[in-house]
Amino acid sequence: MGNEYILSIDEGTTTTRAIIFDHDGNKIVSSRRTIDAILPNPGWVEQDPNQIWNAVQSTIAMSLIESGVKPDEIKSIGIANQRETTVIWDKETGKPIYNAIVWQSRQTADLANKINSEDLKIIRNKTGLVVSPYFSATKIRFILDTVPGAQEKAEAGQLMFGTINTWLLWKLTDGKSFKTDVSNASRTMLFNIDTLDWDDDLLKMFNIPKAMMPEVTSNSEIFGYSENNQFYGATVPISGMMGSQQASLFGQMAFEPGMVKNTYGTGAFAVMNTGTTKAISDNRLLTTVAYKIGDKVNYALEGSIFVAGAALQWLQDEMELIKSSEQSSEMAQNSENQNEVYVVPSFSGLGAPYWDDLARGAIFGLTRGTTDADLVKATLQSIAYQSKDIIETMSSDSNIPIQSIRVDGSASQNEYLMQFQSDILGIPIQKSNEMETTSLGAAFMAGLAVGFWKDLDEIRTVFKHGEEYVPTMKEDQRDDLYFGWKNAVEATMMFKHTK
């Protein structure tokens, strides 16, 4: 296709990346910047929306400079983003009225806990979600309650709400495009996954004015064009938008019902494509929109682990047991205990299938002989145990046996973790050759909209398999270890530090 490329903006929880891909799905360059967390109170996590936007601008510029790709060679832009994170800004000034409230933040737990049982059922039926401060609705309500005059301004149409994709689209187009896509909309707790639009009953329930909500679109169409000289005068279409986990599913080419991917990032996210049929979980997994291309909608089952790679960061920064995440694999392999130590890293509550916002981290099985290596190994194992919780529940709820898991994310580079994950699940684990599958998924969506790739069949030719891990653990050992994990989780949930 000559010198033509797709640029992906991958705005994650801790880093912003700008990645340029060629037609064969090869990564030409990747530029990144770190995003600071603002922690005003225990359990609260916020970010500066303007810092996020500045990071996007600088990484775009860096990627073009480092690659030598000319701005007019960028065929299209795709956006993948941390989901649920909530930004509200003034329509006239373009300035956020409050920090972005990050998906991890528990600051709206009281609002979520006040929702009555009847409304819980309504929300579940309409959105496919369980009620949690994790989603955007309570975050919007918090900001409107906290900022003086915000409710009145919202009702007058003077405020705009967006998850990070909408904020970036609005900034990239210099305020000309105010849109979101179905994958991000389905994570707000305000979106009806049957009608594929904002739900009036839910907006009324949370007293959120519809005037502040963006237009909902598919994942692959032209949403607007770049302005503000980000591309040195070239006008580039923005034609792909996806929430991070759906983008990873798509980037792993899990296009068929029953295909599962697990991303090990700050948290860990297992997503199963259920096709055009919604699978309703009996175990509080989430039913969500995977993606929409044209008129066709694919749904997914999803389970989220709040702490995965963040547990390795905890070992490094707070506990000072490791100097890098790479070191954790070697230490785990050097541990000589019999796996009797369990770490439950519920630093900000437990996600699916437990959904316990008040749970806090715990360690079980300590003895006088427990070493640093034992604690590191148990922490790595906790990520695999949590993933098993979700993946086995997923198989049960969908009635689809899972034959293998496609994995990506930074922690998927940890050899010990991947082997233990395969062992504790009893199924093969397959890594993608390209670790940036979230960015790749957004690139695919953007490219499909502008004819860079013709269809899904052409995209399938791009996929390259990476390393595979196969189980070697005996079944009785697997069962014993998992039994111990379930006991550790139960004990963790029983302990509450307040009355």
Image (tube, rainbow, N blue to C red):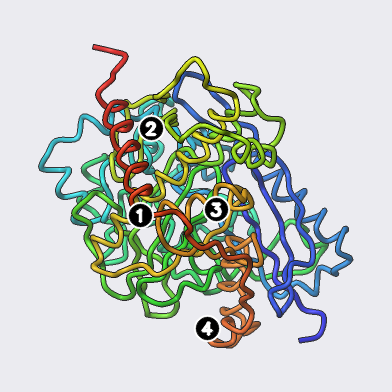
Q: Nearer the viewer, residue 83 or 473?
A: 473
Residue 472 position within the rendered picture, expressed as x and y whole percent measured from the top left: 48, 58
Q: Of the numbered discs in the image, which one, if any, rests on residue 144?
A: 2
Q: Residue at x 73, y 43 (%)?
A: 33
Earlier in the chain: of badge 1 and badge 4, it is 4
Q: Nearer the viewer, mark 2 or mark 4?
A: 4
Which residue carries the number 4 mark? Answer: 456
How far apart are the two marked residues, 1 and 2, measured between alpha carbons?
Answer: 52 Å
Q: Nearer the viewer, residue 52 or 23?
A: 23
Residue 426 falls left or right of residue 92: left
Instruction: Kindly indicate whether the residue at mark 4 contacts the one at mark 2 (C-beta within 8 angstroms).
Output: no
* Secondary structure of the residue carrying numbered label 3: helix
Which residue carries the number 1 mark? Answer: 475
Q: Quadrant of the C terminus?
A: top left
Instruction: Kindly indicate whether the residue at mark 3 contacts the one at mark 2 (C-beta within 8 angstroms).
Output: no
> Callout 4, which amino acid?
Leu
* Secondary structure of the residue carrying numbered label 2: helix
Instruction: Kindly indicate whether the residue at mark 3 contacts the one at mark 4 (C-beta within 8 angstroms).
Output: no
* Secondary structure of the residue carrying numbered label 4: helix
The answer to whether residue 457 is above or below residue 428 is below
Q: Residue at x 49, y 37 (%)?
A: 102
Earlier in the chain: of badge 1 and badge 2, it is 2
Q: Callout 4 environment at 10 Å: few (<14), some (14 to 19), or many (20+)?
A: few
Residue 327 falls left or right of residue 278: right
Which residue carries the number 3 mark? Answer: 418
Q: Nearer the viewer, mark 4 or mark 3?
A: 3
> Callout 1, which amino acid?
Glu
The answer to whether residue 450 is above or below residue 278 is below
> Callout 2, which amino acid?
Leu
